[in-house]
Amino acid sequence: MPRFTSRNNGTSPFIWCAAIICAIISIVVIFGGIVVFVGYIIIHPRVPVISVAGAHLDFLKYDIVGVMQTQITIVIRSENDNAKAHALFDETEFALSYEGKTIAYLRQSEFEVGKERSVDYHYVVQSYPIPLSPTMMEAIDFAVKKDVITFELKGGSKTRWRVGPLGSVKFECNLSCELRFRPSDHSYIPSPCTSSHKH
């Protein structure tokens, strides 16, 4: 009768090395997650805030042909109320429009705001000549007579806080508000305009 024998070659060293590496990676990931979670609980960071701190209607002119030009200075404030964490603001962009028509964009490269600090950026927004539709002409005529002209500002910034090696958590701060001015003296009519995360 034929005889059957079994032979155990053992586990390959390559498999052992792969298993050890995977175990080390798993431990590092778990440990990193615990550190970030504990850091978040201890620091409990507040979401950074962006807001309109001020504005000014530098000039506004339009003619009977139906072309408008304007220049507006807008002050955007970035606030970081965290006492233990720096805040990074990135991909900051806003669109300024009149009667639904975009007339200019405001952009800012990445910047950092220190603990419990705020930073103001002054944007001088000069529009290109804007052809006005009959409806827009009526709207601007009415605005001048009423001495209140309204522009829309929409946009936001991607923010994140960081504390040394603890990693970072990302948020989005968005604005959607109306900027009102008096054409007679070019002054800004203040009104609340902050990102939706602030309570």
Image (tube, rainbow, N blue to C red):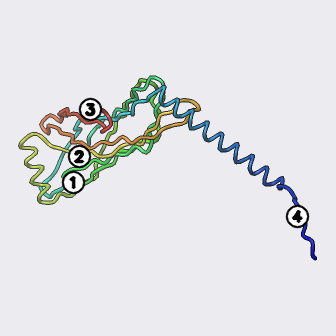
Q: What residue did someone put label 2 on?
A: 152
Q: What residue did someone put label 3 on?
A: 54
* Residue 157 pos. (x, y %): 39, 42
* Residue 74 pos. (x, y %): 29, 37
The kind of residue tagged 1 is Gly
* Residue 7 pos. (x, y %): 89, 62
Tags 1 and 2 touching, CB below 8 Å: yes
Distance between mark 3 and mark 1 Cα atoms:
22 Å
Earlier residue among tags 1 and 2: 1
**Residue ID at (90%, 66%):** 5
SS assignment at label 1: loop
Tags 2 and 3 touching, CB below 8 Å: no
Q: What residue did someone put label 1 on?
A: 100
Earlier residue among tags 1 and 4: 4
Tags 1 and 4 touching, CB below 8 Å: no
The kind of residue tagged 3 is Gly
Q: Would residue 136 be found to the left or right of residue 73 on screen?
A: left
